[in-house]
Image: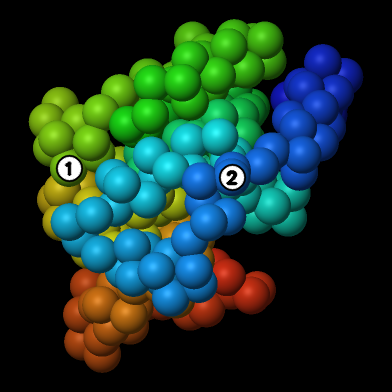
Amino acid sequence: MTTLENKSVAALLDRLFAEAEKATSPATNRLSRSERDRLLSSKKEYLELYTLMKDLWLPVSRETGTLLYLLARSSSAKTIVEFGTSFGISALYLAAALRDNGGGHLITSEFEPSKVLGATRHLTEGGLIDLVEIREGDALRTLSVDLPESIDLLLLDGAKSLYPEILDLVEPSLRPGALIVADNANYCPEYLARVRSKGGPYLSVPFAEDIELSIHL
């Protein structure tokens, strides 16, 4: 039995996905589509948007969560970095993979304090908190120091406009063969151009509807 199949973890994920579907954000609903898209693409106002969305869970889908688990297991990942913890659903999948790989370390970053508390509570309930280090604050600072020498997998699922900057911080530690999963990467053409560049240090393909999957060569 995998950790994901453990009754308590499976029930926890079922409950969290149900809660995520019910979450609403009146502040975000008042934004026009154009204003929301502008904030999503901004490198300076991203904190404003994600503060407005603090009550939204913004989780990965079940399919993406399962993909993360499979990628981490198949690569025997021991060190994982995540940009954008939210309430910890994706972290549960990644930490479950680490548990089933025999242990490891997940570093994840979230600037919204209420989400840090929620993620900590959920990871504790799932019995996986011992594998996870949640760094509170702007990831441009929290992920700029004390990263492992070798990183096996990187998940980008925070402010889309910052994907290139976060990659800059983590890239020196990415081992050859390390995997990068970027959720909703279509919101950052700059990132896509970088990882898809011919002759660059990545091999990259779009996966499913909203994932960019890359390997560090």
Numbered mark located on residue 140 in the image: 1
Q: Residue at x 49, y 10 (%)?
A: 130
Q: Residue at x 37, y 63 (%)?
A: 40
Q: Quadrant of the C terminus?
A: bottom left
Which kind of residue does numbered mark 1 sit on?
A: Leu
Which kind of residue does numbered mark 2 sit on?
A: Pro
Q: Residue 9: x, y in percent?
A: 77, 22
Q: Is residue 45 visible?
A: yes
Task: Report whether 157 appears left or right of 190.
Answer: right
Task: Report whether 62 appears left or right of 71.
Answer: right
Task: Report whether 216 appears left or right of 7.
Answer: left
Q: Nearer the viewer, mark 1 or mark 2?
A: 2
Q: Residue at x 59, y 43 (%)?
A: 25
Task: Report whether 85 appears left or right of 141.
Answer: right
**Is the residue marked by circle 1 packed among few (<14), some (14-19), or many (20+) residues within 10 Å?**
some
Mark 1 vs 2, N-terminal side: 2
Secondary structure under tag 1 reads helix
Q: Is residue 17 visible?
A: no
Secondary structure under tag 2 reads helix
**Which residue carries the number 2 mark?**
26
Q: Residue at x 15, y 48 (%)?
A: 169
Q: Residue 131: x, y in percent?
A: 47, 17
Q: Residue 156: x, y in percent?
A: 40, 53
* Colour scheme shown: rainbow
Toward the viewer: 53 or 166?
53
With respect to residue 57, does 10 lie above or below? Answer: above
Toward the viewer: 90 or 73?
90
Q: Are marks 1 and 2 in contact (CB under 8 Å)?
A: no
Q: Quadrant of the N terminus?
A: top right
Q: Residue 160: x, y in percent?
A: 36, 61
